[in-house]
Image: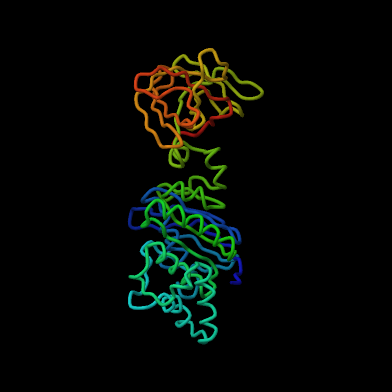
Amino acid sequence: MAALQHSLTVRRLAKHYGPTRAVDDVTLTIGRGQFVTLLGPSGSGKTTILMAIAGFVQPTAGEILLDETPITPLPPEKRNFGMVFQGYALFPHMTVAENVTFPLRVRNVARAEAERRVAEALDLVQLGHLKDRRPSQLSGGQQQRVALARALVFQPALLLLDEPLSALDKKLRAELQVELKALHRRVGLTFIYVTHDQEEALSMSDSIAILRDGKLVQEGPPGTLYERPATRFVADFLGKSNFLAGRIVERRNDGFAYAVDGARFVQHGPPPAGDDVLIALRPEKIGIAAEGEPAPNTVEGTITAWSYFGTSFALIVETAAAGTLQVTVPAWRCPVEPAEGRRVRLAWTADASVPVVRD
């Protein structure tokens, strides 16, 4: 399936419902052929932005441009965007092939050309052998594939996806995440995806835009956002983090030292302005060290709770200096047998954590 790649710019977009600012001055540029995810909790504005891009919501302010051409005044049918919803929105009385054909019928595509495109679209989602079935005869995952084929069959300028996998069970959702990313690579289309699932966003996206209360908080590649979150909210929302609030006691060429309740820790990288600092530390970057084993940062504590997840143990460790810490260690090489009340010595390197802004 040939697909032209298009860029999209959202410039100073706002949508107000009375005093409520559902979207508040958001600017975002999506490059040609990118898979970009709008990520945030409920009420963050991500779906409102997607609906504004689709043309179903008229912005209060700002503009939307496709390849630098303003499209804000255009109705949805003039934008030529594919749309995939959470609830599939398939016609129950139509077969799979008829559902996929529908967008071509309303565009008056010739029958022979329509049949060719439908066959091509169903092959893309591996459902050609089910073309004569009705939606009620399909699984949830198969219905979602039909919705994808229908959104792609007319060769849209962009594909917009509003939490399309949220109704599926965890295992099937994980399988379709892999398939959807592979589909994106094959068709080369620009995808704009909405979800509140952090793992989904991390596994599929070229870039993630994190939203909170209608505002864009941070955007960038998944690895950058996870490893270098700018704010406490991003560090806490995208995965799990521990937070150490301390005071800088020494500045060095390679970093700085900070104190938390009398304990001293070291951190790589330039120190923030001022003396107060907030450090985000991921649970999987904390290890359990033997007594006397050298490490840049150590703290002793007591396991107060633990869980087994097959590949890992998740520990809750109460420490005198750093408060309660979440720790994730590989199960196959955990140096201690987890037990409530067991004393452990925690350790992490100077580059394992990152300073973040309080918000």
Protein image colouring: rainbow
Question: Which quarter of the figure is the C terminus placed in?
Answer: top left
Residue 25 drawn at (x, y percent)? 47, 53
Q: For the N terminus, which image quadrant?
A: bottom right
Relative to residue 89, is residue 10 depicted above or below?
A: above
Residue 52 at x, y percent in the picture: 44, 63
Residue 296 vs residue 236, the one in the foreground: 296
Residue sitting nearer the eye, 115 or 88: 115
Q: Residue at x 37, y 68 (%)?
A: 138
Please state if 306 lies on the left or on the right of 67 as rendered: left
- Residue drawn at (55%, 64%) of the image: 65
Image point (41%, 50%), residue name:
196
Q: Is residue 189 above or below residue 194?
A: below
Q: Which image quadrant is residue 76 in? A: bottom left
Task: State left or right for residue 171 relative to residue 252.
Answer: left
Relative to residue 205, is residue 119 depicted above or below? below
Q: Position of residue 162 (x, y in %)?
A: 42, 60
User: Does residue 259 lie above or below 214 as drawn?
Assistant: above
Residue, far right: 253
Name the foreground residue: 262 vs 68.
Answer: 262
Q: Is 122 in front, or is 260? A: 122
Q: Number of callouts in the render?
A: 0
Who's the residue at 44% across and 77% down the image?
97
Q: Position of residue 263 (x, y in %)?
A: 48, 15
Q: Quadrant of residue 69?
A: bottom right
